[in-house]
Amino acid sequence: MPHALWPSGSPEPPRTTGPPPAPSPTTPPAPLPAPTTRPADVLVIGGGIIGLVTAWRTAQRGLRVTVLDPAPGGGAAQVAAGMLAAVTELHYGEQALLALNLESARRYPDFAAELDEASGSDIGYRACGTLAVALDADDRAHLRELHALQQRSGLESEWLTGRECRRLEPMLAPGVRGGLRVDGDHQVDPRRLASALLTACERAGVTFHRDRAARLLVDRDRAVGVALADGTRLAADQTVLAAGSLSGRLDGLPPSVRPPVRPVKGQVIRLRVPAPYAPFLSRTVRAVVRGSHVYLVPRESGELVIGATSEELGWDTTVTAGGVYELLRDAHELVPGITELPLTETRAGLRPGSPDNAPLLGPTELPGLLLATGHYRNGVLLTPLTGDVLAAALTDGALPEEAHPFTPARFTPVPQEQPV
Ligand code: GLY
């Protein structure tokens, strides 16, 4: 997966040497040398969809924005399927995240229309709905639980028999035992989204610096930009760390503001539905098969995306025979006809997981440093809202209320009282 901080294809992000020794409390810190570029109002580290939407929305508000990334437009969005699955990916104990996800889903139609206009392209927003189905008694019990949770949460979903599911999607296997129709969970094409955001940023006057951040620069207890590997300094009034799963690895971050994000590997495959077979599926179809999530996301272009594994394997982005086998096996149980389709791509990406599966949004304890990371399974869904709340925080200095439960402060270690 292309990295935000490090060039695409590096299996292991290169490390720079450790931070310089801290000055003694009595010695004032030496002033930093003059910046080697004109300071920006805002520097965004990471040009994936989260960094780009932050840059675009902030530039629209009149600030001078620079994005630092060796390959902007890359990152996890190049792998993601693009489900906007606030309702079908609901989990126990994640009510606050549900509210955030629903709010971003609500903003998607206007966001897509505005971005299409700003970029002169089409991000593939498709209000197609989702059908979550069960293949055996265990899957059905799991889906019944999800339905009950959705109802308790006031969400719209409808229980269907297997026959009703097949009436909606005739390519489904005869063994489908029931399902949940969720008409509010849609899709977007994340690759088109990334490319449109890149164009919109360029048109809004965002500057791109195609390089990687080596170290955060801190001066008098304030973030003042970054240093690159060759020593170039990019100075900025405010710096946003939006580097996906790599966000916790930037040198120079004080421990109290280092985001606790980790990579969670997802393998995804892409098939092509030839014109005579289209529409193969009319909506996203998903299931939990023997405990593993599988989903099939059909695009209007004929692309059929099948995902995704979820693996805690560090920085590994190898596509494995086992991963592809499991996806094809489970997808084939749901929709047997997929074996006839050409296989066009296999790929693995890294989701930026956080300890509570929710993003870290807004200012940190270190003045001048904000975070937009840790979006885990919801990066594409949360793109519109992230852009809005970060741009507001950067321009007004106040994080909008909907993001308050997601400030980085929830992970700030509480200082231990010293025994007297
Ligand atoms: N939200 C889908 C995934 O992360 O696989």
Image (tube, grey):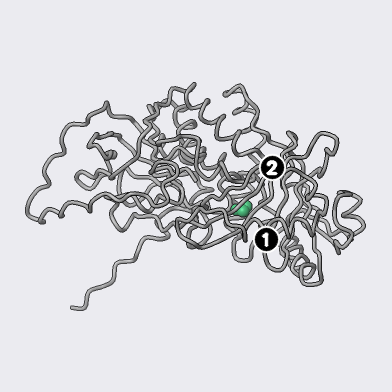
Q: Image quarter for residue 93?
A: bottom right
The front one of 402 and 234 is 234
153 versus 37 height, above or below: below
Which one is earlier in the sequence, the residue at label 2 or at label 1?
Answer: 2
Q: Amino acid at mark 2?
A: Gln
**In the shown orientation, is residue 188 left or right of residue 79?**
right
Q: Image quarter for residue 305?
A: top right
**In the shown orientation, is residue 137 left or right of residue 314?**
right
- Pointer 1: what residue? 326
**In the shown orientation, is residue 168 left or right of residue 232?**
right
- Pointer 2: what residue? 187
**In the shown orientation, is residue 127 left or right of residue 177?**
left
Q: Regarding mark 1 in the picture, which secondary structure is present there? A: helix
Image depth: mark 2 or mark 1 in front: 1
Residue 310, horizontal then vertical, whole percent? 58, 60
The front one of 103 and 159 is 159
Q: Amino acid at mark 1?
A: Glu
The numbered dot on residue 36 is none
Q: Regarding mark 2 in the picture, which secondary structure is present there? A: strand
Residue 251, horizontal then vertical, whole percent? 29, 50
